[in-house]
Image (cartoon, rainbow, N blue to C red):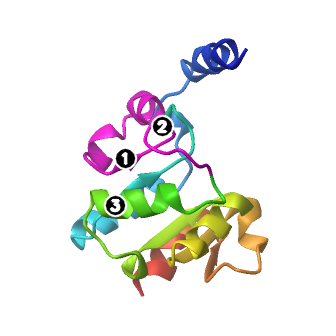
């Protein structure tokens, strides 16, 4: 059943495009690149690479994608974020997780990382920073 569910999900993902990217993401990535800061994806989804390809962001995270195919424990376990940090050779205490789910906020904090909550996760009491909308993230992070 899990395989069938994932196949249906992947069919739904086929409709993704660059128009599916949250407002503010491209501007944030551009600013991080201008400053020479490393970026990684830490996702429990086994489809993170596929999603990045569909929305045209694969090259923005080359070498820094840790997803459900690389982990044995899902969020709120910190494994995905710790492995993502290793991929880009950055100590956990020097990382900032941008997260839209409560389980991800908990995972980031458990990894010893700072967390910026967006969307519903912005209300989580353990967030270090909050950005609603995400377009505020660059200002908060890089000031």
Residues under numbered marks 1 and 2 in contact, where contact means CB atoms less than 8 Å apart: yes
Q: Is residue 70 magenta?
A: yes
Q: Residue at x 30, y 48 (%)?
A: 60
84 sits left or right of 20 in the view: left
**C-alpha distance separating marks 1 and 2:** 8 Å
| Mark 3 residue element | loop
| Mark 1 residue element | strand
**C-alpha distance separating marks 3 and 1:** 9 Å
Q: Is residue 119 magenta?
A: no
In magenta, the rendered stretch is 49-74
Residue underneath mark 3: 39
Q: Residue at x 33, y 38 (%)?
A: 58
The C terminus appears in which quarter of the rendering?
Answer: bottom left
**C-alpha distance separating marks 3 and 2:** 14 Å
Q: Residues within 10 Å of mark 2 (few under 14, many from 20)?
A: some
Using the rendered view, name the quadrant where residue 115 is placed.
bottom right
53 sits left or right of 74 in the view: left
Residue 59: percent from left, percent from top: 26, 42
Residues under numbered marks 3 and 1 in contact, where contact means CB atoms less than 8 Å apart: no
Q: Residue at x 76, y 73 (%)?
A: 124
Q: Earlier in the sequence, mark 3 or mark 1?
A: 3
Using the rendered view, name the quadrant where residue 78 is placed.
bottom right
| Mark 2 residue element | helix
Residue 13: percent from left, percent from top: 57, 23
Front residue of 31/14: it is: 14
The N terminus appears in which quarter of the rendering?
Answer: top right
Residue 65, numbered label: 1
Residue 48, numbered label: 2
């Amino acid at each position: 059943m899990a395989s069938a569910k994932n196949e249906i999900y992947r069919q739904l993902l086929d409709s993704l495009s660059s128009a599916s990217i949250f407002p503010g993401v491209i501007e944030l990535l551009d600013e991080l690149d201008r400053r020479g800061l490393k970026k990684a994806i830490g996702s429990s989804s086994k489809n993170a690479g596929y999603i990045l390809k569909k929305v045209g962001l694969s090259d923005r995270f080359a070498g820094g994608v840790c997803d459900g195919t690389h982990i044995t424990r899902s969020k709120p376990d910190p494994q995905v974020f710790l492995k993502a940090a290793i991929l880009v050779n950055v100590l956990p205490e020097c990382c900032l997780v941008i997260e839209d789910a409560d389980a991800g906020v908990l995972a980031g904090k458990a990894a010893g990382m700072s967390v910026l909550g967006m969307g519903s996760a912005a209300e989580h009491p353990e967030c270090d920073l909050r950005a609603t909308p995400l377009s505020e993230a660059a200002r908060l992070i890089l000031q």
